[in-house]
Image (cartoon, grey):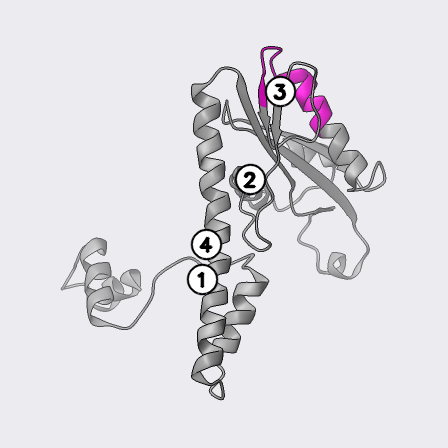
Amino acid sequence: MHALYKQKYPDHPVKYKFYLKYMQENFSLSFGRKQIDVCALCEELKIKLKNPHLNDNAKRVYQADIELHKRQANKFYKKIQKVETKCKNDPKVYGIAFDYMQNLPLPHIPVQEVFYLRQLWIYEFCIYDMKTGKSVFYSYCEGVANRGTNEVGTFVLDYIKNNIGNDAEELHLAAEQNNNIKKIEYYIPKRGHSFLPNDRMFGTAKRHIRKNDRISTPAEYEA
């Protein structure tokens, strides 16, 4: 909108910050990024609240459900932040977050007919290390293995064996253990509010993929 304003009124230039502040204070508009991967329960409750036939009691119940749901989701995020801080400050505490990225099609090419064909799926399993802030991706195609508990356990165990120090006494967000670890904590977020540190890595990977309009092999996804 600011760019359109500058095109229409080139003789009255204003800075973006001033334009944004003026629009927010004088117009009933909201600015923000397009929402993706929103919570199904949040959307369901919001739609119910918009029902003009709801009585006041029902509205209060739905509003209370939304507030409780969001508090539970925020509790998970705060816990993850607390664990990250603890991992960085205590040499004997480790934490990992792991999740699958959205499936990647192969080939990834701008050809219209591809939309109607059965493509090969590439699976990307990401493990984020809360101590180092770095991530490791395990990539494989659907013909090699599934996306089940066996695969998840294999990747997590491999990462622990190769990246978790022998001095570890406390491990967060892990499905396996070694003899030295005295405590394991596993956190499960509220459904629809499962934004993990891995998702930042997924965003970086997707930006890289969007820069390439032709991908024909699994190795090109990993490049």
Q: Secondary structure at mark 3?
A: loop
Q: Amino acid at mark 2?
A: His
Q: Nearer the viewer, mark 4 or mark 2?
A: 4
**Residue beneath the point at 54% across and 52% down:** 193
On screen, residue 54 versus residue 190, left or right, reads left
**Residue 135 painted magenta:** no
Q: Can you identify the residue that label 2 sits on?
A: 208
Q: Amino acid at mark 1?
A: Glu
Q: Nearer the viewer, residue 153 or 15?
A: 153
Residue 67 got which mark? 1
The image shows residue 5 at horizontal and vertical percentages of 25, 66
Residue 71 got which mark? 4
Please tell me how many numbered marks the rendered image carries: 4
Q: Secondary structure at mark 2?
A: helix
Q: Nearer the viewer, residue 194 or 185?
A: 185
The residues tagged by marks 3 and 1 sit, at their Cα atoms, a distance apart of 36 Å
Seen as rendered, the residue at the extreme left is 12
Write down the quadrant of residue 164 in the picture: top right
Label 4–label 1 contact, CB within 8 A: yes
Magenta range is 156-170
Q: Mark 3 packing: few (<14 Cα in 10 Å), some, or many (20+)?
A: few
Q: Amino acid at mark 4?
A: Arg
